[in-house]
């Protein structure tokens, strides 16, 4: 298992490296510049000085080497890069990228982790219950719920919930991650409840969309497993139905779901990007859109790097959980 983990970590590092090359190439080839201004009093000479100071007049390959930190290894005049632990400096915010990201990462991770836990805790029991009562009313109700969840756009549901609970009845805040005025003045319990109130709408929207697909997959896997020969044999031996479902069938039916864990985490990260902009949630998605609009290369690359890392980490955790749940799987 140790050798397998080392191989996977090396493969993940190579995958992240090649993803940075592709991302940087696409960003560099896109039109526009981060060093622009609408102020007519700013001279072209000053703009060129800024471009030179930030290295924007260098060839693309050299800019990538500077961002990665390879140039710093051969010349102390070059600024530090990823290899030296620096994510660069944001032109849009005029400060190091490392000082911008922590609060945004915290918001997005809290949102995604809570959504993942809720969607998985609900999807497996609902899928199992629907499969055990195939073609009956519970199964048909769950199927209808899944179709609605997969077809309803998340941003529309978010706007609907904001209109109803934030505008009409005013039970929930109209967006954001916390109260911008009074949060720091609250007690620890008050700050926790403030975070909780702001998370209700985005978590509901993301869980509703993720639960629809996961529940359908869980149901399909359980229906297939319940039709296998060893399940029929267990029933013929007089094993009770709850024991057949939860001990014999569920352990095998859940395996395909675990393999989706990494992709599900990455999908939630991408799906939250649009939602964050709709509800003004100060997370990574909102930050990425702002960076793209301003062509802030260092900030964009940092967000893409974190996204690649999360995808690799999610798949690695999924494979470890799969080996732990199913002893038949060997990672020699």
Image (cartoon, rainbow, N blue to C red):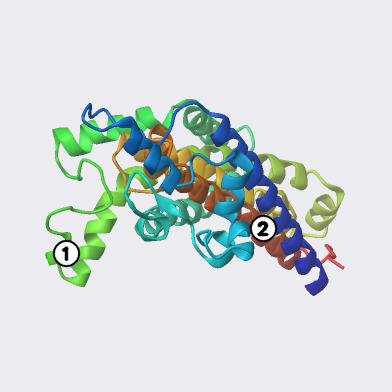
| Front tag of 1 and 2 | 1
Question: Compared with residue 6, is residue 305 higher up or lower down, i.e. above or below?
Answer: above
Give x and y (percent) for residue 65: 61, 51
- Near mark 2 (Cα within 10 A), the count class, few <14, some 14-19 or many ≥20, is many
- Near mark 1 (Cα within 10 A), the count class, few <14, some 14-19 or many ≥20, is few
Report the residue marked by disc 2.
Answer: 318
Is 106 situated left or right of 149 in this image?
left
Residue in view at x 31 percent, y 45 percent: 281
Most extreme residue toward the bottom, as rendered?
A: 2
Is 117 situated left or right of 9 in this image?
left
Number of marks in the image? Answer: 2
Residue 184 got which mark?
A: 1
Q: Identify the secondary structure beneath mark 1.
A: helix
Is 212 or 26 nearer to us in this picture? 26
Q: In which quarter of the image is the C terminus?
A: bottom right
Give x and y (percent) for residue 167: 16, 34
Residue in view at x 77 percent, y 59 percent: 238
Is 142 situated left or right of 90 in this image?
right
């Amino acid at each position: 298992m140790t050798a397998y983990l080392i191989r996977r970590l090396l493969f993940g590092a190579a995958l992240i490296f090649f993803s940075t090359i592709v991302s940087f190439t696409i960003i560099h080839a896109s039109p526009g510049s981060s060093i622009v201004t609408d102020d007519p009093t700013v001279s072209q000479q000053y703009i060129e000085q800024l471009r030179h100071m930030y290295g924007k007049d260098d060839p693309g390959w050299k800019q990538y080497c500077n961002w990665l930190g390879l140039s710093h290894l051969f010349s102390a005049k070059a600024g530090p890069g990823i290899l030296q632990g620096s994510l660069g400096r944001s032109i849009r915010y005029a400060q190091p990228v490392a000082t911008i990201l922590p609060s945004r990462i915290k918001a997005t991770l809290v949102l995604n982790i809570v959504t993942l836990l809720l969607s998985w805790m609900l999807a497996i029991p609902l899928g199992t219950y629907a499969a055990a009562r195939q073609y009956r009313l519970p199964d048909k109700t769950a199927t209808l719920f899944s179709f609605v969840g997969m077809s309803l756009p998340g941003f529309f549901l978010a706007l609907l919930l904001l209109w109803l609970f934030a505008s009409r009845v005013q039970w929930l805040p109209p967006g954001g991650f916390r109260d911008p005025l009074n949060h720091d003045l609250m007690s620890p319990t008050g700050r926790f409840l403030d975070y909780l109130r702001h998370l209700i709408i985005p978590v509901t929207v993301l869980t509703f969309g993720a639960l629809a697909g996961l529940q359908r997959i869980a149901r399909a896997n359980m229906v297939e497993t319940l039709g296998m020969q060893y399940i029929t044999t267990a029933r013929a031996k007089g094993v009770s139905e709850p024991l057949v479902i939860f001990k014999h069938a569920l352990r095998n039916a859940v395996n395909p779901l675990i393999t989706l864990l990494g992709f599900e985490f990455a999908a939630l990260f991408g799906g939250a990007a649009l939602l964050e902009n709709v509800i003004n949630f100060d997370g990574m998605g909102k930050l990425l859109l702002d960076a793209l609009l301003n062509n802030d290369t260092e900030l964009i690359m940092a967000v893409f790097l974190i996204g690649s890392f999360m995808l690799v980490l999610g798949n690695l955790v999924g494979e470890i959980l799969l080996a732990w749940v199913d002893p038949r799987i060997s990672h020699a």
